[in-house]
Amino acid sequence: MEKITEQQIAEAAKKFVKDGATLKEIKGVSNDELEAVYSLGFGYYQTGRFSDAQKLFEFLVLFDHLSAKYWFALGAVQQAQKDYQKAIASYGYSSFLDLENPKPQLHAAECYLALGDKENAASAIMALEQYAPQGTELGREYRAKAAELRKTIGEDAFEVEE
């Protein structure tokens, strides 16, 4: 096996910072390979093997930190393990990478509620209502879920035109 020099590491780090490259690009890992890891992690998640799933999802966000899907999966497994603070952070990254996907905000709101933080739950719900895609079934579905959460915390609805 060829030894990696400090200069090669420095060059890769410069590319990573300058060009926004992901580790998967630097290491030559394909999307298909990452998706195979995701499928395995998702299977672990579905069968309650949360610790194993978390390791795989952490690997995925390390190799492709620009994937909203991988950050969301990490947040879901953290939430399932009641690690709500970490889940909120992971959902935040996912939301930042895909603003029109209302799922991370909804689950972040659930995490805030589990922590007893109604103020931040209300903020997450407001973000969901504001950024969910207009005129789509997904947007309507998640706004309805947001309305239910608002009732739970006794908040008035945030008006967004549909």
Image (spheres, helix red, strand yellow):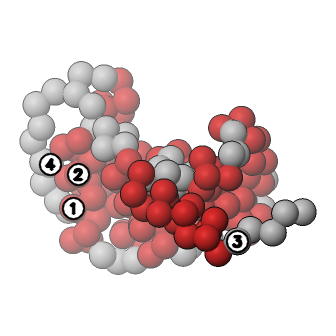
The three-letter amino acid code for the residue at tag 3 is Thr
Q: Residue at x 18, y 43 (%)?
A: 130
| Residue 138 shows up from this direction | yes
Mark 4 highlights which residue? Answer: 157
The three-letter amino acid code for the residue at tag 4 is Ala
The three-letter amino acid code for the residue at tag 1 is Ser
Residue furthest right as drawn:
1
Q: Nearer the viewer, residue 9 or 99?
A: 9
Q: Quadrant of residue 103?
A: top left
The three-letter amino acid code for the residue at tag 2 is Ala
| Residue 73 shows up from this direction | no
For residue 5, the mark is: 3
Badge 3 marks a residue whose secondary structure is: loop
Mark 1 highlights which residue? Answer: 123
Give the CA separation, mark 2 to mark 1: 6 Å
Percent across and percent down for residue 111 are 42, 67
Q: Nearer the viewer, residue 76 or 141?
A: 76
**Callout 3 environment at 10 Å: few (<14), some (14 to 19), or many (20+)?**
few
Q: Nearer the viewer, residue 66 or 51?
A: 66
- Numbered circles on residues, count: 4
